Image: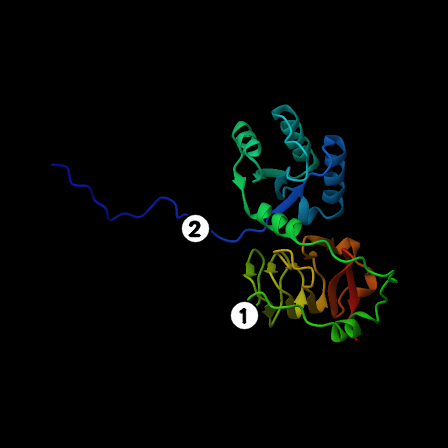
Amino acid sequence: MNVVNMDFEPAGELKIGQVGIANLRVRTLDVARLAEEMRSRVQRAPNLFHRAAVVIDFGGLAQTPDLATAQRLIDALRDAGVLPVALAYGTSETEHLSVQLGLPLLAKFRAQYERADASPAPEPAPPRREATPAEPAARAAAAPAPAATNAQPGLMQVAPVRSGQQIYADHRDLTVLTTVGAGAEVIADGSVHIYGALRGRALAGAQGNTQARIFCREFHAELVAIAGHYKVLEDVPKHLIGKAVQVWLDDEQLKIAALD
C-alpha cells in the first residue's frame, strides 16, 4: 500500500493582500486618445506609471466593446507603457469579454463606483470663488466634521514605511509617526497623517470619501490622491516641495497648500 506523506513544504506560498493597482475607467472608447493620454502620464511620471499594472473598467460606457476593439485598446495601452492586467467587474458581457481576452475580473473598483453613483445628487451650491492657500486650515476648522461611518480607531504606524511596503487603513484614518520612503505606499479609507517626510505615495478616501485629507510634515510625494483624484510630484508647485502641506478636494479639484 502506498503511503502519502502529507508533511511537506509547498513549492509556492500564496497569500491574498492589499495591492495598489491603477484603475482606468473608460468614458470615451477612442483607442488612440486613451493611448495618448496614458503615454503622456507615463512620460510625465515614469517612476510611477511605467510598466504599472492597470485595471480597465468599461462601466462608464453604454455598451461593452467587442473583442477586437478591447484587444486593440489593450495593445495600445501596452505600447503607451502600462500593463493591463484585468477588467473591472460590470456585466455578464464584461465577464464574457474577460474570458475571451484571457484576463481576470476584479470587483473592487466596481463596488466603489456603485456607491458613488448611488448617492443622491447634491443640492446646487451658490457660486464660490477659488480657495487661496491661506484659507484651507480656517475652512477645515469651521466646517463640521463628516459623520463617521465606522467607529474603529485610526491605524497608527510607528516604524518607517520603506520602499516596497504598503500600509492600508480599512475604514479608518492612518497616522504615520515617521517617514514614508520612496517606493512605499500608504492608503486609508479616511484621512492620512504623516509626521515625517512623505517621499512615496499617499492615498486617502480610498473608498470614495471626498472629505478625506492628507497631511504631512515634509512633502516630496511621488503621488497623492483623494477619492481617485491625484497629482504627481511634477504637477506640484515647486515652492511646496519640502514644506508641511495638506491636500484636499474642492469641487473635484485636488488642492495642495502649505500649513502655516
Q: Earlier in the sequence, mark 1 or mark 2?
A: 2
The scheme the figure's colours follow is rainbow
Whether residue 38 is visible, yes or no, is: yes
In the image, what residue type sits under mark 2? Lys
Q: Is residue 244 above or below residue 58?
A: below
| Residue receiving disc 1 | 151
Q: Is residue 135 above or below residue 96?
A: below
Q: Residue at x 54, y 27 (%)?
A: 100
In the image, what residue type sits under mark 1? Ala
**Given contact means CB atoms under 8 Å apart, are the residues at marks 1 and 2 in contact?**
no
* Residue 97 appears left or right of 258: left
Q: How many marks?
A: 2
x, y percent for residue 7? 24, 49
Q: Residues within 10 Å of mark 2 (few under 14, many from 20)?
A: few
Which quadrant: the N terminus?
top left
* Residue 159 appears left or right of 133: left
x, y percent for residue 234? 77, 53
* Residue 191 appears left or right of 251: left
Whether residue 200 is visible, yes or no, is: no
x, y percent for residue 206? 62, 56
User: Which dot marks residue 96?
Assistant: none
Q: Residues within 10 Å of mark 1 (few under 14, many from 20)?
A: few
- Helix, strand or loop at mark 2: loop
Quadrant of the rendered structure where residue 33 is? top right
Between 225 and 45, the one lying in front of the other is 225
User: Which dot marks residue 15?
Assistant: 2
- Helix, strand or loop at mark 1: loop
Q: Is residue 182 above or below residue 100?
A: below
Foreground tag (1 vs 2): 1
Q: Residue at x 79, y 66 (%)?
A: 257
